[in-house]
Amino acid sequence: MLNAVWLLLLGVGIITAAVNGNIEVVTEAALTAAGNAVTICLDLIGVMALWLGIMRIAEKGGLIRLLARLLQPMTRRFFPDIPDNHPALGAIILNLSANMLGLGNAATPFGMKAMQEMQLLNGGCNTASSAMCTFLAFNTSCITLVPATIIGIRVSLGSSDPVAIVGPCIFATAVAMTVALSLDWWLRTHSPWRERS
């Protein structure tokens, strides 16, 4: 669906430029945007490498196991179907930690690992378990305390105050997470479509 939307936007833009006799603007804009994308990606490599390295050190140094123990009351409450010390809990915590630091790209492998581990617990069923749905709600709406990627982009584009986004980002993501987890809870407990045991 998203591909169709992008295709429609590109098609309308090209046709509009052609009708107005400005077709060269499309080529110029495409080349400029491609060059800017490469520059921004190169600027972000340092930020991503730093935080991915910190996450790897935390994982290898046992900090993740310690975090899992400290966050066990929260994970027990939100993921009661996952056994204690299961690898899925460690992957969930790594994913949420990366998301809290605004590192969506770093969070993706941990999210995939968490889903794989939860699918093993799901017994190969084709329907997502409650834990998988709750994790998806967390993953897509997780509060972002340090939007490192956004700050990195703002720095690379010469922002005079690159960290000005932190406060609004914390507020917006906190509201999003509250709404997502509230809906997840309601759908699991009160929805007419919930699983019947």
Image (cartoon, rainbow, N blue to C red):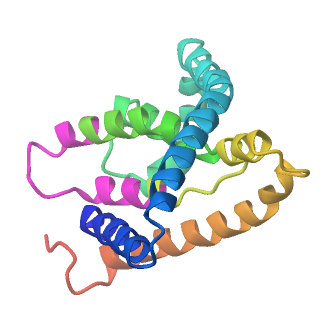
Seen as rendered, the residue at the extreme bottom is: 192
Q: Which residue corresponds to the image point at 39% horizontal and 40% vertical from the top-left? A: 111
Q: Could you tell me residue 183's position as x and y percent?
A: 42, 76
Q: State the residue in front, 38 or 180.
A: 38
Q: Which residue corresponds to the image point at 61% horizontal and 22% vertical from the top-left? A: 49
Residue 159 lies left or right of residue 151; in this view the side is right
Q: Could you tell me residue 93's position as x and y percent?
A: 51, 38
Q: Which residues are magenta?
A: 117-138
One can see residue 97 in this view: no
Image quadrant occupied by the C terminus: bottom left
Q: Which residue corresponds to the image point at 72% horizontal and 68% vertical from the top-left? A: 171
Seen as rendered, the residue at the extreme right is: 160
Residue 3 lies left or right of residue 156; in this view the side is left
Q: State the residue in front, 172 or 64.
A: 172
Q: Quadrant of residue 67?
A: top right
Q: State the residue in front, 84 or 49.
A: 49
